[in-house]
Amino acid sequence: MGPCRREIESILSSLKITDILNPRGFRIPNCDKKGFYKRKQCRPSKGRKRGFCWCVDKYGQPLPGFSEKERGDGQYYNSESQ
């Protein structure tokens, strides 16, 4: 199981324990089929505002030059294959 999938499992386990479902209170990572992080990660949208997005490596570490300051799809996502 990849690191991204492990994070999802941890989040789901904590939700079962607390029995609270508030999608804006936590971030669910975007994983690939092998359980690693996809390059594009985003916070949940709030109403009509898109959540902040940023780029990470397959282990979930933010890539240099890309931060959570970009809202929605940034120009740097165009070359990525998801």
Image: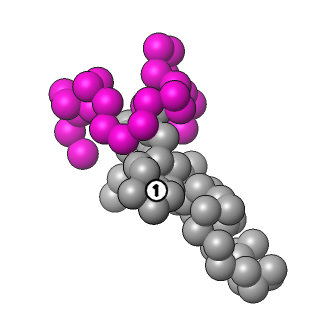
Q: Is residue 1 visible?
A: no
Q: Is residue 76 visible?
A: yes
Q: Which residue is mark 1?
A: 45
Residue at the farthest top position? 65
Residue 59: x %, y % from top left: 53, 37
Residue 33: x %, y % from top left: 34, 58
Residue 58 or 47: which is nearer the viewer?
A: 47
Residue 32 or 30: which is nearer the viewer?
A: 30
Magenta span includes 66:
yes
Say above or below: 20 vs 29.
Answer: below
Residue 46 or 28: which is nearer the viewer?
A: 46
Q: Which residues are magenta?
A: 55-82
Residue at image position (24%, 45%) is 82
16 relative position to 74: left or right? right
Residue at image position (80%, 80%) is 18
- Main SS of residues in magenta: loop
| Residue 75 lies in quadrant | top left
32 relative position to 22: left or right? left
Say above or below: 63 vs 25.
Answer: above
Residue at image position (46%, 56%) is 45
Say above or below: 17 vs 61.
Answer: below
Q: Crowding near pointer 1: few (<14 within 10 Å), some, many (20+)?
A: some
Amino acid tagged 1: Ser
Say above or below: 76 vs 45.
Answer: above
Residue 23: x %, y % from top left: 58, 68
